[in-house]
Amino acid sequence: MNVSGGTTTTYVPWAQPAHEIQSRVTLYCFPHAGGGPSTFARWKTQLPPSIDVRALRYRDTGATHGTHPPHPDGITAIAQRIARGMASLPSEALAFHGHSMGALVAYETARILQRTTGQEPILLSVSGHRAPHLPRRGDTLHDLPSQEFWKEIVALGGTPHEAASNAELRAITEPGLRADYQACERYLHSAGRRLTCDITAFVGDSDTTATPEEVRQWDRHTVGDFSRYVLPGGHFLGGASHDLMLHALTQRLMATAERSGG
């Protein structure tokens, strides 16, 4: 796996190279369903240089953009690929942030690393997803007819109406998006050891996919510290709420890195 931003030959490449200056912690960012590295493109300038931001994609570029059909991997299979790549990285202070689907993938990646290497990220940050042990609620989207599927996707926010109304763009992105939703909707949590790393959770006060109480229950999945931030907004936090989230995340990362000797 090439982690420096050059040609990648693996299923899950790191999409962002490291900062040229020494960072205190490397933050791996796990996107929402249908998302990719561009989701976190601005984070490298919005977060301090002491945090090295590296964004992930869940499948190769051809599958993501419809060149060939994406394999409908489950959350655990995606996490296993990521964890295998991380197991070979030099020892460094790692942290994870995942939004929506990314919260599940980040969580399962941390659990796999715990089991296989004995190491965990120093912080697991999640947003826009209820605690993983809670049963799924809401409609199943991945097998809806195309028009209904896109109506639901647009309703969640985060997808411009212009993009959803472009037939060519829909044809390119829909297979990967459906595969991601299928992975989320078929996810079943398995009991196991709790993480020892801290967990920080963010949720919008009007998010229809996760209530503040459902997000609070992430505290059951760590023996470390837990913190929750309820911010104004929906499933995708924007504007001032997004800035507040990044500020809180930076504070948590720096405090945790200091405590862990990073």
Image (tube, rainbow, N blue to C red):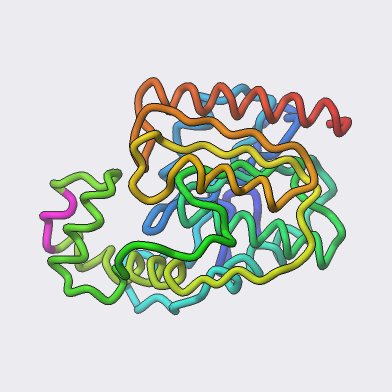
Quadrant where the image shows the N terminus? bottom right
Classify residue 177 as left or right of residue 20: left
Q: Position of residue 213 (x, y in %)?
A: 51, 43
Residue at 80 percent of width and 60 percent of height: 114
Q: Position of residue 22 (x, y in %)?
A: 75, 28
Q: Which residues lie in the magenta part?
A: 163-167
Q: Position of residue 254 (x, y in %)?
A: 72, 25
Classify residue 215 as left or right of residue 171: right
Quadrant where the image shows the C terminus? top right
Classify residue 138 as left or right of residue 262: left
Q: Residue furthest front?
A: 213
Q: Which SS type dominates the magenta stretch?
A: helix
Residue at 56 percent of width and 25 percent of height: 47
Camera sees residue 62: no
Classify residue 172 as left or right of residue 95: left
Tell whether position 63 is magenta.
no
Q: Quadrant of residue 16?
A: top right
Count the labels in the image. 0
Q: Position of residue 94 (x, y in %)?
A: 73, 43
Q: Quadrant of residue 143?
A: bottom left
In the figure, 195 relative to 10: above or below?
A: above
Closest to the observer, 23 or 83: 83
